[in-house]
Image (cartoon, helix red, strand yellow):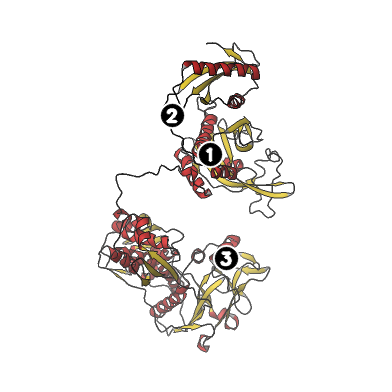
Amino acid sequence: MKISLNWIKEYVFPLNMDENKISNLLTEIGLTVKGINNVNKDFILDVEVTPNRTDAMSHYGIARDLYAVLKFRGYKVHLLKPVINEETNTNSSSDINNKSHIQIFVKTYEKCIRYSGILIHKIKIEPSPYWLISRLESIGIKSTNNIIDIIHFVMHELGQPIHIFDMDQIEDGKIIIKNAEKNTDFQSSDSIMRKLDEEDLVIYDAKKPLSIAGMINHMKSNIQITTKNIFIGTACFNPTIIRNIRKKHLIKTETQYLFEKDIDPNQTVFALQRVAFLVKKRIKNNIICSNVIDFYPNPILLSKIKLRYNKIINIIGKKISRKKIKKILSLLEIIIDYENKKYLFLCVPSYRTDVRREIDVIEEILRIYGIHNISVHNQIKIDTYPKIYCKTEYEIQKILFEQLISHGFQEIISSTMINEKKYSFLLNSFFKKKEIKIINPVNQSYKLMRSSLLFSMMDCIEHNYNNNRIEYNIKFFELGKIYYKKNNQFLEKTYLGIALLQKEKMEHKNYSFFYLKGIIEQIFQKSGISNYTQVLSKHPLLENGISILYNHKNLVEIGKFKNNILKKNEIFYAEIDWKYLVSVIQEKKIIYVPFSKYPTSRRDLSLLVDKAISFEKINQLIKKKENHVIKRIKVYDLYEGMNLPTSKKSYTISFFFESEKETLTDKIINNSMKEIEFFLKKELKAEIRKK
């Protein structure tokens, strides 16, 4: 959002501070300034306002925050509110006077929270004065005429969407806000013919539509050079409704951007009074303004919040004096209704639509107080309690995501719809799952719901690879749903997908597979999952892969993507059944086992077995022996090829022995090894290879 520094100085006075210091100050309080440009003896700040801060999406909103932090830090500044003409009073919808010659009817209360309007007679359309042109052009808005420019000025001054009609084109002096009639043709001012339906919110007169929710006018309701009488309206609509209408009809206007946010419903009348004041002041004509007509059946109540002093200390980590807390609240126009020694009972202004909870108020206090004033101790206390044993799904997700990010993986959020033509060779092969088609897709190429996260992740990998977005390895993960049809039922399931692109120059062919498998094993280790088994994967999209089972149920699939669409670069993929993983972690109990005081001993065993025998089978057989001194085993070496029969392969397996009661003697270890050799010969017909 572009903000003019000269414009800001009209509200914060005196502002004797250079643009860089102001920029740093705004950034400190959460209004990040991305850049500063010098335009016509003015500095234009490119301010990044988060979507929830609708109160700061205007020049006066920025000035209000800037004033609060400057005043708190000791600067002698004043906040000057935009001037209005007090003679333009408010009338309720039930008491509209005849001088207005206009009536407002709202038939959709749930969509229209408030609607206000004013009539201005005997205007004269002409070029704007230099100061107004300069103000608008500094923030990238081209001047149109004096009336339209004043509308734009007030919108960017207060952050309130405003629309305007030629009053002489309004039939029977009626403004009606209601749902459109089915198959209504609407020739909008951007020369596009739009087809409206019952879901669209439209402003009508007695006979015809005037505007789509105040965002874009009908071409016949716009003001012209000959216009003499105008109707100006402001509204607070349901933002979700506006967002849906905008997306459906591809509308892009300044008004729509503001309507989509949770704007202050208590500002509509003030915005009209400000417009009327500027019109009367700048147009040298016998201007006549009606009273403000206001429809506001269910006034929004101000938020009431209880703020505890001890909660402020617990969250911020520092005791801030009560005097300073009250001063910050006062500067933010948050009223203290009641107080005692333990807490404050607050009344939050309606324009702060983002402040609804106690934690929001604490954030506001810290924002103005300054996070740089909170000292950080040299020593950090770490809780030894293993956090993975937290029971909520959100906590588990947070910890595992942090683990993946620490290994260089990046989270992505991809589309749930896939390109049918691109993946036609793989569809209908995903077990017995049938794809779900969208009846009325936005894009005809993307009309299938994904039956695997791999499809949408592939699109993301391919896009980043082809555009050289990532210089080194491409490592992505995504938590999302898949959709499929089985036994005439529509089903969805949540998976955690992890993908890795192996560059063609990698020296070791299977490095990425084992790296990805190692990541999964680390997740298991952190989650306390140990007694799992591995079998060859039958996943139709993966080759040379394995399935990891827990309690005989499939938990993870790992392998190489079958179809290589990125030249010689291979993609390795792991898919975790998320809900099952969470349930396994939640069932885990914390058991404390002290470290053994006695040393660990290792013995290696080389054996020749049939090619069809996997290490996992050997591992499970040895576990069944229930030898309590064997703590773990792992593959040290695997060999196939020269000097071995074609039907055989050689494993070298490391055995680790440890006791919690005593130091194991060579005799005990050697006897255990002899038992293992005898057992493997019997069960697998293995040949023990001597060194």
Q: Furthest-front residue in view?
A: 661
In front of the other: label 3 or label 2? 2
How would you rate the neighbour count of disc 2 (Cα within 10 Å): few for under 14, some for 14-19, many for 20 or more?
Answer: few
- The residue located at (52%, 28%) in the rendering is 511
**Which quadrant would residue 428 be assigned to in this image?**
top right
Assess whether mark 3 and mark 1 are in contact (beta carbons under 8 angstroms). no
Distance Cα–Cα, label 1 vs label 3: 38 Å
Residues 326 and 45: in front is 326
Residue beneath label 1, please?
466
Label 3 SS: helix
Residue that numbered label 2 is attached to:
596
Location of residue 430 in the rendering, given as x and y in whole percent from the top left corner:
68, 39
Q: Earlier in the sequence, mark 2 or mark 1?
A: 1
Give the left or right position of residue 403, taking residue 243 as reference.
left
* Spot occupied by residue 235 in the image (x, y as percentages of width and height): 51, 73
Q: Residues within 10 Å of mark 3 (few under 14, many from 20)?
A: some
Q: Which label sits in the foreground, 1 or 3?
A: 3
Determine whether 77 is above or below 685 in the image.
below
Figure check: 165 above or below 70: below
Q: Residue 66 or 343: which is nearer the viewer?
A: 343
Q: Which residue is under mark 3?
A: 241
